[in-house]
Image: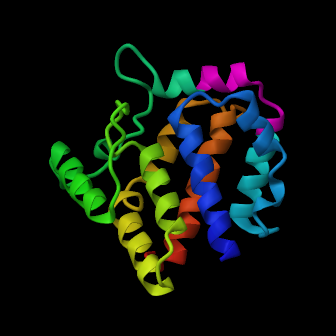
Amino acid sequence: MEENGARAGLYAVLSHLFHARPDAQLLQGLAAAESLIEDESGVLGDSWRALCAAARDTTADEAGAQFDALFVSPGLPAVSPYASSYTRGRRRGQLLVELREDLALLGFERAEDNTEYEDHFAALCDVMRGLIAEELGDAEAFERQRAFFRDYLGPWYSGLSEQILAAVPEADFYSSVARFTDAFLTHETQYFDLA
C-alpha cells in the first residue's frame, strides 16, 4: 500500500506540472521531496533527485516562462500535451471517443468548468492517480490501472518527453521534468509488465 501511495503521489506531481505554470509552493514541495522515492539508484531515482534539485534552483517565474514556451501559444505550441497528437493508426477523434467511453465505465466525469480535452497528459495522470487510490481488491485495481495505462499513456509518453527535450535547453527545469516523466512511466511499464 505504501508503494501505491508513492505512485499516486508521483502521478499527482506530473499532473500538476503539465496542467499549469508551476507556482512557488509546488516548486518548494518538490525541492523538499527527495525521499518520496526510496530507490536510491537507477534512472528513476536519479531523475527524481535531478527534478528535486532543479525545483530548488528554479523560480516560479522561470518555470512559468518555460511552461508557457512549451505548451502555450497563440498559434501551434512547441509541444502538444495531448495523446491524440502522438498516436498512430487511429483517426484523431477516435482516441477521444474511446477514452470518453472508458472514463464513463470507470466512473470518471469531466468537470463542467474544464476546457481541456480528456486526452491531455495532466488529465490522464490524474485518472491514474484516482485509479491507484480506489478501494478495490488488489487484482481488480491492478488490472484497471494496467488497462488504462496500456491504452492511454503507454503508447505515447516517450514521444512527449522527447519533444520537450528537443524544445528546451539542457539546463531548463522542464528538461528535468521530461527526464523524470520518461523514467517514471518506463518504470510503470515494467511494473505492469508491458515492455
Is residue 1 depicted above or below 170 in this figure?
below
Q: Is residue 57 magenta?
A: yes
Give the image quarter of residue 44. Answer: bottom right
Residue 180: x and y in percent read: 64, 52
Total marks shown come to 0
Residue 115: x and y in percent read: 34, 30
Give the image quarter of residue 177. Answer: top right
Is residue 100 or residue 37 the one in the foreground? 100
Query: Could you tell me which residue is drawn at 44 percent across and 27 percent down?
Result: 78
Is residue 34 or residue 5 the one in the foreground? 5
Residue 86: x and y in percent read: 33, 46
Left or right side of 60 for 139: left
Task: Name the quadrant of the C terminus.
Answer: bottom left
Left or right side of 108 for 187: right
Is residue 68 depicted above or below 43 in this figure?
above
Is residue 165 or residue 29 the one in the foreground? 29
Q: Is residue 128 magenta?
A: no
Task: Name the quadrant of the N terminus.
Answer: bottom right
Residue 117: x and y in percent read: 31, 38
- Name the magenta segment's main secondary structure: helix
Query: Could you tell me which residue is drawn at 37 percent across and 33 percent down?
Result: 114
Query: Could you tell me which residue is drawn at 44 percent across and 32 percent down?
Result: 79
Left or right side of 2 for 164: left
Left or right side of 39 for 165: left
> How is the structure coloured here?
rainbow
Which residue lies most toward the top here? 74
Provide the residue span drawn in magenta.
55-66
